[in-house]
Structures are given as structure tokens and as C-alpha cells.
Image (cartoon, coloured by chain):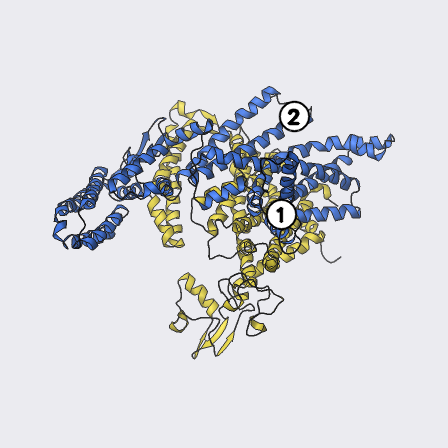
Amino acid sequence: MLKYIVKRIAIFIPTLFVISLVTFYLSVNVPGDPVEQMLNSNSEMGSSANAQASEKAYIDKREQLGLNLPIFYFSLTNRAVPQNLHEIPKKFHRQNLERLIDKYGNWTEIQTYYNSLKEFEFKVAKVQKDSTNADALINIKEKLQKLYINYDDNAIKSSFASITTNLNVSASLSEVKTYFQTVEGNYEKGVKGKATVYKKYIPAVHWYGTQNQYHQWITKFMVGDFGISYQDQRPVKKVIWEAVRWTVMLSIVSIILTYLIAIPLGIKAAAKKDSTSDKVMSTTLFMLYSLPVFWVATLLIMFLGGGDFLSWFPAYGVGEISDSDSFLTVFWTRFYHLILPMVCFTYGGLAFLYRQMRGAMINTLSQDYIRTARAKGLDEKNVLWKHAFKNSLLPIITLFANVFPLVISGAIIIENKFSIPGMGKTAIEAISARNYPMIYTIVMFSAILTMVGYLVADILYAVVDPRISYNKK
Amino acid sequence: MAEEIKQDYWSYVKRQFSSNKRALYSMYVIIFMAMIALFADFIANEKPIYCEYKGNTYFPIFRDYGVSLGLAKWPKDLLNINWIDAKFDKCLRAPIPYSTTNQDFFNSGFVSPFGKQNVASTRWRHWFGTDDIGRDITAGLIHGTRIAFIVGIISMSIASFIGILLGAIAGFFGDNKIQISRASVIMGIIFFFLGWFYAFMTRSYTLSDAIGESIIKFLGELLLSLLIFIGALFAGYLLGFVLKVIPFFKTKVNIPVNIIVQRMIEILVSIPRLFLIIAVIAISKPGIVLIMVIIGLTSWTEIARFIRAELLKVRSLEYIEASEALGYSRWRILFKHAIPNAIAPVLITVAFGIAAAILIESSLSFLGIGVPAEVVTWGKILAKAQGSKSQMWVAIFPGIAIFLTVTLFNLIGEGLTDALDPRQKK
């Protein structure tokens, strides 16, 4: 048995590895610049006026987040793309440079152009502002920012033209003019003049070793360091832990409830197959199965929770408790608040399990040994619970693996509708805030939880049915 | 006795299905709803079907199709017209004279369908009420039907394609029936990457720029990329022949397709689907097409399992052996003989799958993720209801629509299960 469990866990590792790759791939491709996002949420750093200082802040933050490293162990690109492109700090600049590389293919020239552009920017930032050049400076800076994100030839040229006119406005700008001429020269003669587009068509593989973002992320993940939440700068671990408790608690209680209700109902229905009560039961539960959970939640809140119809239950949250409250008060407050969400968590799985239980039981009851049991004079209760029940339980146990993901997915909607601070609610909040470390940790966790569900189902299966031996093969 | 009863498999299934009245009537209702979805533009539209304006005759709804295909242009008179307030000389309006986007400012703030409405005549009544900003719920429901059906059908088509292909290969070939020479494996891997490189990586900006321009241009570029990719694979295949001259490369290696497919399924079912979809949607622009594709790409596992199990049975049947003995190639046997005989149970999963896809789409709409702002869906209308009883209509009607559609598809699925189950044979 132990051997089997170890083997089963060993199979999980590659699965988890692939899931981590998928998750990481998604997290790398997020829109927007995570560093900017972090800096913006830290207002003191974002407001730094000096261009050089803010660039320094940017680079530091980037290094702290580990984003200065290459993305993966290796990269498959073309000859035109340099091996160390990831060293360009700003994400939008990097994306634009990639575009330029794709268009012209000569990295050294593009790099010279980029550096001269940056130098020009610093020089412009140093120019003393006065009444004669204020407007021109603003215009120049605006066009400069455009140059960083433009790769289209016409767009770049129109920016150039605009900067040239603005540079001629005031004599105080003549100093930076030469720098701008270098920029222009680098673009026209270097980038465009010495284009090597053919390099784009030669594949190239770069090897980076373990100093890469994925390696850092996954090794940290394994020791429980999930990064920092963009929203409130707290460690993701802490936020997740607070959320996971609710989701796991609710799903386990609801699964237990589901089994406790569905099994007797299913057996009763199977024993009285095709009777009126069976038909009513089956139809009702079949309809329950198709009821969208968000609709049920909305209606429950509308009619039973705090609305203007029947105000029987609190509609939102998990209730306020203070440290001085006794255990019973705490329990009652929580219980009272979680009744409606619990109903939503339970009914879908209930309908599913009931159908399966009924089917399995009907199947078992048609077996020969049941007829034998009846023939030898056993009463119906004994036949049902002692002989048939045990044998039809088997398929039901394995369904644990199906019910568990169902419940976890349901958590997203239910927790949001009822404002329960669980994983589902945290996930949606993280998405609207573009809090990516949070989102991807949650995805990883939901996958791990589901896999644990499968493992438990497999082990239960082995425990219940002694015929199944996992040591073979 | 007028007609001879057909004895072939599909006629039998049809008869079995028709004898299940519940499933049969569900089917009729679904066909009716599909018609609503198809003709939604003619049922609920602010534009008249036919109108005469300033001496000219127009068919605005048809012209709208032409304009969106780029074949026609709006005449000056109609370009910025307010379709609802405009005074036409003659006009025939759609039964529901509102589009999903029309905001009726006189009836905003959840107007009840039963109370007094501030409308010109019964013709303009909001039969199912309005939402917070005065949009007609009826129009939303009718156009929501279209979204729900499109999502259900397209996503399950994608899922069926992947599921049938992978499941069939896994079931038919198992773990030790596909043997490929080392040359083919090596060339396959090398040229796969080369093809990927030239088809998608060097062309990645061409492709992504084309998405922004128009869908037709994108499909054209995509086709070109696919051709390059397939061309590369073919080149690899040919080179493999040359390489086989060397004995080392001629040795066959076993490809355990079954294990590979099983692993893929295991990985996919390990990530709760809603979480996965949310993670993907988080990085991309909202769009119905994206939702359909993701649902399709994540829901093929059940179909693959079904068809795999079916083909495990089929592959040892005599007629397969017979066709092998006749010397047909294995791929031909798989696609021409094995799959057609195993495909019926897939219909069951597809029916249940459409129900599930519609549920997922409406859940996403309800949560407000992934569906663009201007698209009105059932879930979105439902999400407007905030818990007050006065907004009851906004919750009840779309809820019924979702519930009904999902139930009907589930009933059809159940009917198919019974019809295809040989144990139920009468």
C-alpha cells in the first residue's frame, strides 16, 4: 500500500511540473509591466522626478523581483536576437527593441541607437526650464517617450521631425541638439542603413543555466515562498493561507454533507425503482443538477438573505467575531452565515452523486447474489444495506475525485456572491487588480488540491476494495 | 405494413431516441431556440426590417449584414440616424423593436414588466422589463441565446475534433502498436522545431498584427503559417527516408501514444477548469472567440476517454482483423472503419458538453471576466440583479433561460445515453 502511494505521488511530480510550466508561461505573458505596477503602488518611489533616479529605482525593483534574469533555462530564438536582451530593464522598451530587431536584424546598431536615445533623454532632463523653452521641452519629452515604443518608420520620422522643430525654438536647447543628431544618425545610417534582415531566418538556441526566472520561481515555490502580492505588498503565502482555509473547510464539509444525503436517497430510490417517489426524486434532483449555481445564489440572497422579502439569513460575509467570544458564539456566527453558501456548495454535487448512487445500486440489485440473498429469506433491509450497499459503494467512492474539482470551481462563484474571503474571491480580486503572482499561485494551489483529491480517491478505492492490488504490473 | 423498418445502426438509434418522449421534445425545443439564435437580428432589432425614408426604400437589417462584411455602405441619410426615434414614411419593425445596446432613458432603473412603463404604445413595451440603464431585457435574452448556442456548439466542435483524434489514436494503437524508425523520430523532432520556427516564430509579428487588422487577413496569414509548418514536417518525412539508409537509423522505436494521451488528460483535469480559464483570460483581451477556444481546448478530455474506451473494444473485433488481412493501412482502418463505428457514444458527451460550456460561459459573464463590454449575454443580465426584490425580473428571466437550455441539453444527453445503451434494447 505504502509502495503504491509513493508511486502515485511520483506520478504527480511530472504532472505538477507541466502545470507549473503552463502557469509560468501564462505569468510571463501578462500584459503590462509588473515593475511599473509595483512602483506605482508604492507612491513615494513613483513620484521621483529625476529621470536617472527613477530609472535606478526601476532597476532595483526589477532585480528584487528577479525579473532581470532570463526567463527559462534556454531560449529558442533567431540569430538577430542577442543572448542578453533580458538585461534591458524596461519591458516596453524591450518589446519595442524586439520589434526593431525583427524588422532590421542588426542588434549592435539598434543598441547604439537605443543608448544614444537614452543619453539624449538624460541631457534633455538636465536642461534648465525657463519661459522660452517650457513648451518645447514638454513636447520633446513626449515625443521621446514615443520613440521608445515606436518601431514604425513613419512614426519614428514624424517624431524626429517634431523634435527637430522644437529644438529650434530656444537657444537654450542648442546644447542637446548634437545628441539628437547622433540619435538621428544612428537610426538612419546604423539601424536602417546596416540592416541584416537575413539573421532573422537563422535559428539560435541560447543556454542560460539555472540563473533564470523559472528556476528561481519554482525553487522558491517549493519552499513556500510565493512572492509578494502587488495589491497590498503582503507575502502571497500569507494571503493564500488565509483564503485557502475557508475554501478547504467549505468544500470538505459540503462533500461530507453531499455523501451523507446522496447515498441514502440514492439507495431508497433504487430500492423503489420506477415508483412515484423515485420519479419525483429523480426529476427534482436532475433539475437541481442543471441549476446554475450563480442563479441559485442570487435568488437565495434575493429571497432569503437580508433582502426585502424574507430576511432569514445574512447574505454576505462570514460574520464579525471578537477574541472574547466563546467557542459556541463563534461557531454559531460562522454557521449561521455559511448556511446559504453551504446550500449552494452542496446541491450540485448532491444531484450528481445521487444519480450515480441510484445507477450503481440498480445495477447491483439486478445481480444474481442479491436474488440468492432474497431467496434464502433475508429481509429487504438486510439485502439492501448489508449486501447491495457495500458493493455499490465502490464506484461512489471514486467519484470523490470528480466531486472535488466541481466544488473547488464552484467556490469561485459562491465565494464572490456571498463575500466569503476564500480562494475564489481572492482569485477574482487578484484578476481585477492584475495581481499576477497571486493569480498564478492560486492556479497552482487549485491544481495541487485537485490532485490531492485524486490521490485520496485512489487510496480510498484500494482500501474499500481488497480485490484491487496496486503492487502488480 | 407500409414501410420496411430499417435495421441499420443509426436508424435503430433514431428509433430508440424518438421513443424517449422527454428527450425528443427537448430536441424540438432546442431546435426552436436555435432558430431564435439564428434569426435573432430579425426578432429583436432597433433597425426596421423594411422602411421608406425620404423617398427611398431600405432593408436596414440586411444592409447591416452587408456593411459588417464590407460589401455595402450606409447611405448618408441613415448613417447617424436614431433608429428608434426616426420618423419613417413607412416601416416594418422587428417584433421586439430594441437592440441589446439601446438605452431607454425614460424606462431606466429596473422597470418591472408588469407595472406601468413610460412608453409610447404597447408596441414599444418592454415585455420582460429593463435593466439599470434602461436596456430591454427581451432583446438581451434573444441575442443572449445566440451567444450561448455559438459558444456551446463551437467549443464542443473544437473539443470533439481534438478528443476524437487523440482518444482514437490512444485507444486504437495502444502503447505498442506505433513503431517509427529512429530516422523519422529524429527528423520529426528537428523539423517540428524548424517548422515552428519559420511558421510561427519568425512570423509572430506578422500574425499578431493581422489579428488587429481583420479576421480574414489573420486567417490568411495563419493558413500560410500552417502551410509552412506542414511543409516543414513533410520535408522532415522525406529526409527521414534518406536517413534510413544507415542501419542505426532504421531501427524502430516504440511510441507509447496511449500513455502520452493519458498523461495529457491527467494534466488537464488536474487544473480546475474555471481557474485555468480565468488564468488564461487574465493575460488576454476579452473576447467571445477566446472563450470558445479555451472551453474547447479544455473540455476534450471526456470525449477522448469515451472514444478511447470504445476503440479498445473495437480494435479486437473481427472486421478490423479482416480489413487488416485485406492489407489496408492502419490509418485508413482507423479513420474509415474504426472511428465511424465508435463515434456514437461521443454524441452523449457532446450533448452534456454543450450544456457545460453554456454554463461556463454564463458563469464567466456573471463574474464579468472575459466577455467584452458591448456583448450582452444571459449571465451578464443576471449579474445586474443585486439582491433587491425590485430587481427580481433581471434575475429570473435570464436564469430561466440558462436553466432551460442546460436542462434540455442534459435531457438530450440522457436520451442519447439510453438510446445508445445496448442493454436497453427492446
Please tell me which of labels 1 and 2 falls first in the chain: 1
Residue B414: percent from left, percent from top? 67, 47
The single residue placed furthest to the front in the displayed view is A324
Q: Colour of chain B?
A: yellow
Specify few, some or many for label 2: CA neighbours under 10 Å numbering under 14, 14-19, or 20 or more: some
Residue type, mark 2 in image: Ala
In the drawing, does residue A30 fall left or right of residue A446?
A: left
Are tags 1 and 2 found on a single chain? yes
Specify few, some or many for label 1: CA neighbours under 10 Å numbering under 14, 14-19, or 20 or more: some
Residue under numbered circle 2: A462
Res. B264 visible in picture: no
Residue A309: percent from left, percent from top? 65, 56
Judge by depth and name the residue closer to the eye, B381 or B307.
B381
Chain letter corresponding to the colour blue: A
Q: Residue at x 57, y 56 (%)?
A: B385
Asked if labels 2 and 1 touch by Cβ distance under 8 angstroms, the answer is no
Q: Which residue is drawn at 69% across and 26% down?
A: A465
Marked residue chain, label 2? A
Residue A51: percent from left, percent from top? 25, 42
